[in-house]
Amino acid sequence: MKVDVLLGLQWGDEGKGKVVDVLTPRYDVVARFQGGPNAGHTLEFEGKKYVLRSIPSGIFQDGQINIIGNGVVLDPILFRKEAEELLASGIDLRKVLKISRKAHLILPTHRILDAALERAKGGAKIGTTGKGIGPTYTDKISRNGLRLGDALLPDWHQRYEAARNRHLAILAPMGENPDITEIEKEWLDAIDYLRNYDIIDSEHYINRLLAESKSVLCEGAQGTMLDVDFGSYPFVTSSNTITAGACAGLGVAPNKIGEVFGIFKAYCTRVGSGPFPTELHDETGKRIRDLGHEYGAVTGRERRCGWIDLVALRYAIMIDGVTQLIMMKSDVLDGFDEIKACTAYKIDGKLTTEFPYSVDGIDIEPVYTTLPGWKTDMTGMKSEDEFPQQFRDYITFLERELGAPITIVSIGPDREQTIERAKA
Ligand code: GDP
Ligand code: IMO
Ligand code: MG
């Protein structure tokens, strides 16, 4: 009986998809517990690259069951596209995937609302992925949502029409009167398509598996600094991306959680608006973006880049109860003379190592420790014995600052470019 959780500790895109794929053979089940197609999880192996949005990253290994939990919001059109592309690559999801009856549905009008609400915010916009995430979770919390299980009920069409009409009535006074005839048809067809899947009471199912001593890996989406409660509010997503979100989003009790893998980049990125204390607006930021190919997997937007922020990371590790750290994209810094790490913030002349209430609209000066770069191409390395001394020193420094062991280091996008470290 074991539920391990893997989640992003920064502002998303840490490399969760890659590591879930690497860890999957050790588990019986891989489950998504929150978020939706705002996620873009990239996996690379055997010269091929895949980007998953709503589907767990365990599907490429043999024999695991994959679950989309109740905490996820599902867009039937995007799900169908994703599933059909995978089928073309020889993966029949219907054999390996189960979906919670309680997962909330993203309607076409949720996406229109997302865009309209962003437009209305003008310069204060969040820079959402435009996938209808905020409006769908809003409906869930205000008890107006539609769940996948509703599509199996006899009065489904009335339920759908009532929800759609409510959305259209919100949009009209905003000057938005969209013609949804086409997209609605495509969406309802995609609902029919979804009926071919195993739609289950996943909380019962997963607890039954746990009672049979099966192991579960929960795959987080987004990152802790995008969590609706603890992230850089209001520039966050609309779900709980933290460890506790795995309990609520799957129906597993907190005392079932085992290891918590916290994943972070050797530097830091953010996409969309909102505060980012260590952001670099200079050549170094551009260099990280170019070397790390830091462009969004979902929207193609440029990711903002900066140095690693240990104040924010320590906060995330505390909230998540991280037991093991995973450092990604170390290779991106291979050519740098110096590496910087932010160890404290200076706010109004005062030093703090605690992540403050708000980091938006206030003057934060990051305080940096500078470490020598390792100036070595690590992308072909096979074991930690090959790591250059300066890189070992960077790891030791981070472990000391963060108070948790770095057990996996990633040195390239491919499945094979993953090095496990011996535990001390
Ligand atoms: P996720 O959303 O957390 O799954 O991360 P994304 O897939 O959005 O972004 C991570 C990007 O970095 C993807 O393009 C990966 O292929 C790539 N990547 C993952 N690990 C590494 C690594 O160690 N080195 C390099 N250079 N790229 C990596
Ligand atoms: P993965 O799982 C990075 C960001 C958006 C925006 C904010 C709110 O690939 O790490 P939303 O559409 O969720 O309402 O947007 O959150 N965002 C992400 N940034 N990676 C993600 O997912 C993200 N999902 C949402 O850019 O700033
Ligand atoms: Mg991503």
Image (cartoon, grey):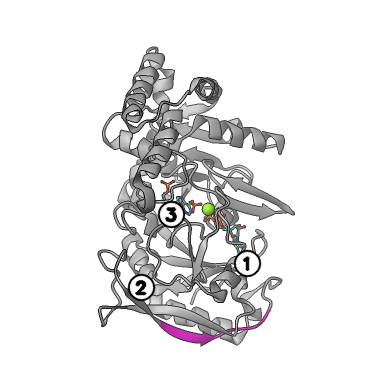
The reply to whether discs 1 and 3 touch (Cβ–Cβ < 8 Å) is no
Instruction: Give residue 19's position: percent from left, percent from top.
Output: 56, 57
Above or below for 156 versus 389? above
Q: Amino acid at mark 1?
A: Asp
- Name the residue at 38% across, 53% down: 123
Ligand 1 within 8 angstroms of badge 3 C-beta: no
Judging from the image, what secondary structure is the residue with disc 3 in?
A: strand
Q: Looking at the image, tell me whether mark 3 or mark 2 is earlier in sequence order.
A: 3
Q: CA distance from mark 2 to mark 1?
A: 25 Å
Q: Which residues are magenta?
A: 368-376
Q: Quadrant of residue 412?
A: bottom right
Residue 233 as seen in the image, left or right of residue 31: left
Judging from the image, what secondary structure is the residue with disc 1 in?
A: helix
Q: Which mark is residue 5?
A: 3
- Note whether residue 44 is visible: yes
Judging from the image, what secondary structure is the residue with disc 2 in?
A: helix
Q: Which mark is residue 309?
A: none
Task: Provide the residue designation for mark 2.
Answer: 311
Q: CA distance from mark 1 to mark 3?
A: 31 Å
Within 10 angstroms of label 2, few (less than 14), some, or many (20 or more) residues?
many
Q: Amino acid at mark 2?
A: Val
Task: Provide the residue designation for mark 1.
Answer: 290
Q: Amino acid at mark 3?
A: Val
